[in-house]
Amino acid sequence: MLRFDDLQLFVRTAETGSLSAAARLLEVSPAVASAALKRLEQQLQVRLLARSTRSLRLTPEGELFLGHARLALHSLEDGRRQLAGSKAEIGGVLQLSVPSDFGRNTLLPWLDAFQREHPQLHLRLLLGDRVADLFREPVDIALRYGAPEDSSLVALPLAADNRRVLCAAPA
C-alpha cells in the first residue's frame, strides 16, 4: 500500500526539482524525505528520480507515475473537502422515538423550526409510549421519562428539575 506522505513528497520533489526543498515544504528532515522516496521506489519496484549530488530529474517511469500520483492526491483532497463540507451542513435522516404526549404537545413545534433551519435533514418521528429497543429498531435518539433500564446506553437528562406528580380525586 502506497503511503499518502510518500506520494506527496514525490510530487513536491518533482515540482520543486529538489528533495531538500520538498522536505522543507512538507516540514520533514532531508533524511526522512530521502527514506520516503526510497520506500516509494521500493514499493513500485522502479526508479522515479535520477539523483546526483548536484542534480535531480525524473526518470521516464517517474514522469509516467507523476500524473497518477497528482491525480491520487487530488482525489484524496477532494474527498477530505467533501467530508469537511458534510460536517458543516446537517443532512440525512434522523429518527426520533418520543412519548406521544411530549411529541405532539411540545416537540413538534421545535422540530418544525429545526427542520426549516436544516432543509437537508429529514426527520422521522416515532410517537409511542413503549420503551424503544435501540439495538433492534432503527432509532437514532429516544426521549423517555425516567432512567433507562439498559445501563449500556448513554443517557443525558434533558429536564432534570421537571418532576411529575400523579394526582387524583378520592372518587
Image (tube, helix red, strand yellow):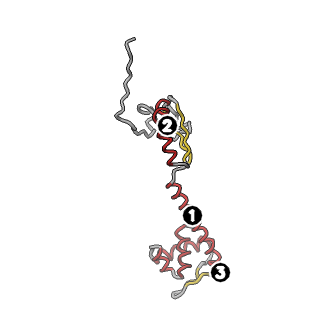
Instruction: Look at the image and tell me in which quarter the C terminus lies.
Output: top left
Sequence-first disc among 3 and 2: 3
Asked whether 112 or 144 is in front, the reply is 112
Displayed quadrant of residue 51: bottom right
- The residue wearing badge 1 is 78
Displayed quadrant of residue 145: top left
- Label 3 or label 1, whichever lies nearer to me, is 1
x and y percent of residue 2 in the render? 58, 67
Residue sitting at 54 percent across and 42 percent down?
123
- The residue wearing badge 2 is 108
Asked whether 112 or 61 is in front, the reply is 112
- The residue wearing badge 3 is 60
Q: Amino acid at mark 2?
A: Leu
Q: Residues within 10 Å of mark 3 (few under 14, many from 20)?
A: few
x and y percent of residue 126 in the render? 54, 35
- Helix, strand or loop at label 1? It is helix
Sequence-first disc among 1 and 2: 1
Q: Amino acid at mark 1?
A: Asp
Vertical side of 4 occupied by 117: above or below:
above
Q: Residues within 10 Å of mark 2 (few under 14, many from 20)?
A: few
x and y percent of residue 160 in the render? 36, 35
Sequence-first disc among 3 and 1: 3
Displayed quadrant of residue 27: bottom left
Q: Residues within 10 Å of mark 1 (few under 14, many from 20)?
A: few
* Outermost bottom residue: 54
Residue sitting at 53 percent across and 55 percent down?
86
